[in-house]
Amino acid sequence: MYPIPQIIQGGMGAGVSNWRLARAVSWLGQLGVVAGTALDQILSRRLQDGDKEGDVRRALEHFPFPRISRRILDTYFIPGGRDASQPYKSIRMHTAENSIPAQELCIAANFVEVFLAREGHGHPVGINFLEKIQLPHLPSLYGAMLAGVAVVIVGAGIPMEFPEAIAALAEHRPASYTLNVAGDRTGESVQMTLDPAAFREPGQHLPSLARPSFLPIVSSGTLATMLVRRIKGDIAGFIIENSTAGGHNAPPRGQMQFTADGQPVYGPRDTIDLEIFRKLGLPFWLAGSYGSPERLKEALSLGAAGVQVGTPFALCKESGLLPAIRRALIAKALAGNAKVFTDPKASPTGFPFKVAELHGTLSDAEAYGRRRRVCDLGFLREVYRKPDGSLGYRCAAEPEKAFLAKGGSAEQAENRKCLCNALVANIGMPQLLPDGSHELPLVTLGDDYANIGRFCSADHPDYSAADVIRILQG
């Protein structure tokens, strides 16, 4: 990865790290990163909302498969925007059986986000994926590579097969990815596949694509060492994330223990040994409460190439967070009322998930209790093996009766939040429900949220990505 940035902007939420934020950061010579989560859903909703500034349609004009662009526009684009009394049109969920329409939309959506983030400058742009969200991996990766993404960052799991997929897709060859299948005792691996030839126009020839650098997010030297041994030569470095970072956290090592208010306890076994990373000889960036000039200097003194910073960028003007939510969170922090709860139950993935407490969001127990469970986006579904040997899909946040019927347990379903709908609501695209209400947001931030006042004040609560970089670099 060249040039090596000092600051990597975190790939946050679904559309929080949007193309505007990534472009602003990359424009200034650091690494801007778009979030690769649910981009097909976000693209479809942008078009249904009328694509008022024409950004999506402008990017689709450059998409190398014009017939796919036309199908997407014919299906989702509503001039002037949809009637607000109508719900958003649903999109096809991803499955292991490789739905071509779902793959087409996903490829195009990732292309659009990276294209717009790269537009107008020549600096590298990255994309962040969650390994746990496996079903869209291949079309997401291919779309981002078609747009010239420079860095692929992957967290929330062990992304062993990404380098091989990158190598295949760079040459427009078929790629595969092994799915985790819950309750599978057959010993048979289940492979997702993507063949780029299925999307090409007749007679179309595409030149080979640049292979992006691969940066796994890890929380231990043991995992980093294993990755280097297994996929040596394909790793450009590591992002080392501790338990104070926002979003999904790695579970504590050893037996789970909890604080009095129900948060997981991280102990000495969770301390990251940086000497292991120094010996590996690859660049590394530290993440989790490194959003200050003092912490940046500390990271550099420890041998890091720099830091990954999320929360300060999540609350800046270019962030995709709904402005009203962003300003309410800033006001809470400036008043000394910032609180982030590490919720061991919220995420259907089973990973602890950082939740910023904010009235009117699903962080309110009362608001959560009123919500009727539904699973209509399905990004966090897990694949499971049915008794007859076929594959099924379930989510611990779906209606409990349905989850139990699919072999899940009541304990797994207890207090789970629908992150898919909530994260899309965070950026101003909440689904309209049958009773006339809308899906509620649920915001994730890191523990450093309490210190956001280093970038803003009560008189000037709005600040920019450029302000974050300027202050971090002193």
Image: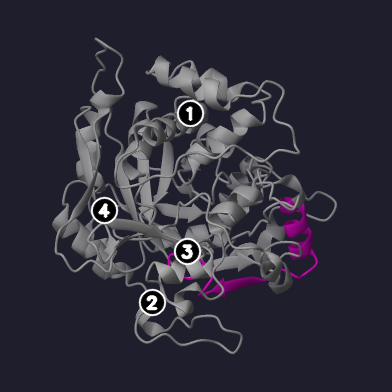
Q: Secondary structure at mark 1?
A: helix
Mark nearest the camera among 3 and 2 is: 3
| Distance from the alpha carbon under mark 4 to that under mark 2 | 20 Å
| Distance from the alpha carbon under mark 3 to that under mark 2 | 17 Å
Q: Residue furthest front?
A: 388
Identify the residue position indicated by label 3 in the image.
Answer: 248
Identify the residue position indicated by label 1 in the image.
Answer: 112
The kind of residue tagged 1 is Val
The kind of residue tagged 4 is Leu
| Distance from the alpha carbon under mark 4 to that under mark 3 | 24 Å
| Distance from the alpha carbon under mark 4 to that under mark 1 | 31 Å
Residue 184 drawn above or below residue 172? below
Taking the spot 43% from the left edge, 65% from the top edge, the residue there is 349
Identify the residue position indicated by label 2 in the image.
Answer: 271
**Quadrant of residue 418 in the image?**
bottom right
* Dot 4 or dot 2, earlier in sequence: 2
**Quadrant of residue 384 in the image?**
bottom left
* Dot 1 or dot 3, earlier in sequence: 1
Q: Is residue 211 visible?
A: yes
Q: Secondary structure at mark 2?
A: loop
- Estimate the x, y position of residue 57 in percent, counting from the top left: 56, 20
Are circles 4 and 3 on residues that touch, CB within 8 Å?
no
